[in-house]
Amino acid sequence: MSTVTRPKLEDVARLAGVSLGSASRALSVPEQVKPDTLQKVQRAVEQLGYVRNGAAQALASRRTRTVAAVYPTLDNPIFAVSIQSLQQTLWKLGYQLLVASHEYKPEREADVLKAILERGVDGVVLVGTDHTDEVFELLRQYRLPYVTTWSTDERRAGYCVGFSYYEAAYEMARLVVQHGHTRIALCTGASKGNERVRARIAGTRAALKAADLELRPEWVTEKPFTFEGGREAVRTVMVGKVLPTALICGSDIQAVGAIAECRDLHMRVPEDLSVTGSDDIELAELVQPRLTTVRVPTSEIGTRAAKRMVSLIEGADVLAEEDLTTCLVVRDSLRRISGD
């Protein structure tokens, strides 16, 4: 029985006709190698099918050139878009991305992070600013740079790339009020361990208060960021003698679920109930009626987080990051009414 020997760096150097040190530099720091040498080494790598030993490289350089990102869930279009831009930017900068999720269970985030740290990474990207002390302590113990993303509300020490959910929610609620609505319900995710939800509630409440309106407790419902969560929200708030005329959802996914539930209950959107979302995913334009929502800088968050992360890893100067901006996208699911 024949055995296949994996090509080594010495084989690459021999085939390329360069020294072992030159071959190593061509693969590790190609910008420091002459173009002719780099071309020879790359050609030899292709011919031999050589793959670098990542563990040995990490041991020698004390870097894995890998960045970890921990997301609340991977089952959400906005996070998928952000992960793509994060990965593409890291790739261009010479880094790989390792992705994990705690499935909106913040108490599990520390365990997820421990598993990642055991593999060895150079930095960590987190979603949101609300994390347990154990998470921050792990990052301190391992002396790992980290970047928090998406929300800038309730920010702690460290570097943050995102926008204010409070401001975005305030603007959406104000828009709904400007359209004549005074009976307004709110569907959010779970507020525990999620500053983004808390900021959304606070921003909505502040906008209503500025209009001398109240966010009724019975019209605030915490549901999962899923289609079914939106359906449940409609069933929860559309009871009693006095009903809301508008439902503000914390995500487009919830809002689409709410529209579907209204259809099944023979309620018209927006005639019987206006529905708004947040994120402006592709589905928001395709659903009927087209969804009024908040457009968030999904891709830009991933790109900026990657650049900030690499700067921190490589010890470059890092300037303070300004909040990114959101904008309202007004479509057919929000109607204007003359009075309540």
Image (spheres, rainbow, N blue to C red):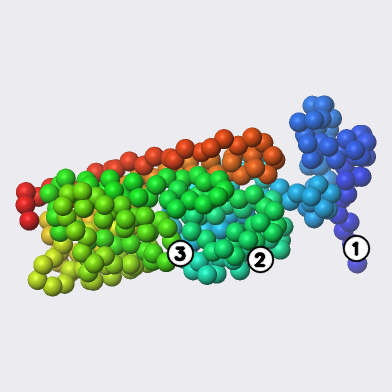
Mark 3 residue type = Gly
Mark 2 residue type = Ala
Residue 115's disc is 2
* Quarter of the figure with residue 3: bottom right
Tell me: 6 left or right of 255: right
Tell me: 300 left or right of 233: right
Which secondary structure, mark 1?
loop
Tell me: 187 left or right of 320: left
Q: Is residue 18 visible?
A: yes
Label 2 close to label 3 by CB (< 8 Å): no
Mark 3 sits on what residue? 193
- Number of residues whose C-alpha sits closer than 10 Å to that of mark 3, classed few (under 14), some (14–19) or many (20 or more): some
Foreground tag (2 vs 3): 3
Which residue appears at 20% of the width and 64% of the height?
216
Q: Earlier in the sequence, mark 1 or mark 3?
A: 1
User: Where in the figure is residue 81, as x and y percent of width and height?
Assistant: 47, 49
Residue 181's disc is none
Cα separation, mark 2 vs mark 1, equals 38 Å
Q: Quadrant of the C terminus?
A: bottom left
- Number of residues whose C-alpha sits closer than 10 Å to that of mark 2, classed few (under 14), some (14–19) or many (20 or more): few
Label 1 close to label 3 by CB (< 8 Å): no
Cα separation, mark 2 vs mark 3, equals 21 Å
Foreground tag (2 vs 1): 2
Tell me: 310 left or right of 106: right
Which residue appears at 69% of the width and 39% of the height?
315
* Quarter of the figure with residue 313: top right
Image height of 17 relative to 122, above or below = above
User: Where in the figure is residue 38, as x and y percent of width and height?
Assistant: 81, 32
Mark 1 sits on what residue? 2
Which secondary structure, mark 2?
helix
User: Where in the figure is residue 198, as x and y percent of width and height?
Assistant: 37, 59
